[in-house]
Image (cartoon, rainbow, N blue to C red):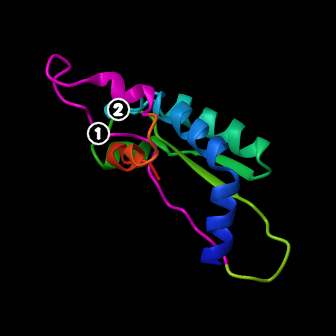
């Protein structure tokens, strides 16, 4: 399975980098998180890739229960395989932590770096 994943990543290298660059350009700093924009982006992009996508709004009472005030969403995407092999599950969050004082931090990181390794620094999967 690991070898198949690596082959697919190698084959789709440019598409993956382009996708990540567009994803990190969405300002999803929490608070407020901007869940609508990032979940809409993921729904559109993953649907175009053949995933079955469900966007679920977190009920207000659950948001308030954990002391939050802004709306939250979860994105669940499933890509059906062709056989009875193993499953691959990716679990991630949609928001990012604040970058810090904008006068002291280079916010250009939201534009997406050109080097692949830099996505690890940004916290991208």
Would residue 26 appear left or right of 101 to someone viewing this image? right
**In magenta segment, residue 57:** no
Task: Please tell me in which quadrant of the rendered image residue 61 appears.
Answer: top left
Q: Residue at x 64, y 57 (%)?
A: 10
Query: Which residue carries the number 1 mark?
Result: 97
Marker disc for residue 29: 2
The spot of residue 20 in percent (x, y) is 53, 40
- Looking at the image, which residue sits at the far right? 82
The spot of residue 27 in percent (x, y) is 42, 27
| Pick the front one: 102 or 113 | 113
- Looking at the image, which residue sits at the far top? 103
Q: Secondary structure at mark 1?
A: loop
Q: Residue at x 25, y 32 (%)?
A: 99
Total numbered labels: 2
User: What secondary structure do most residues of the magenta stretch adopt?
Assistant: loop
Q: Residue at x 47, y 53 (%)?
A: 125
Q: Is residue 90 above or below residue 34?
A: below
The spot of residue 84 in percent (x, y) is 80, 83
Q: Is residue 16 above or below residue 18?
A: below
Q: Secondary structure at mark 2?
A: loop
Please provide the residue range marked out in magenta: 87-113
CB atoms of marks 1 and 2 within 8 Å: yes
């Amino acid at each position: 399975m690991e070898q198949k994943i690596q082959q697919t990543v190698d084959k789709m290298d440019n598409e993956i980098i382009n996708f990540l660059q567009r994803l990190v350009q969405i300002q999803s700093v929490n608070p407020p998180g901007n869940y609508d924009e990032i979940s809409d982006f993921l729904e559109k992009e993953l649907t175009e890739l053949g995933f079955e996508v469900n966007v679920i709004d977190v009920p207000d009472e659950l948001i308030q229960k954990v002391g939050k005030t802004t709306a939250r969403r979860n994105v669940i995407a499933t890509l059906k395989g062709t056989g009875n092999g193993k499953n691959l599950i990716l679990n991630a969050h949609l928001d990012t932590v604040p970058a810090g004082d904008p006068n002291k931090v280079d916010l250009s990181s939201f534009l997406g770096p050109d080097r692949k390794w830099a996505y690890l620094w940004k916290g991208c999967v």
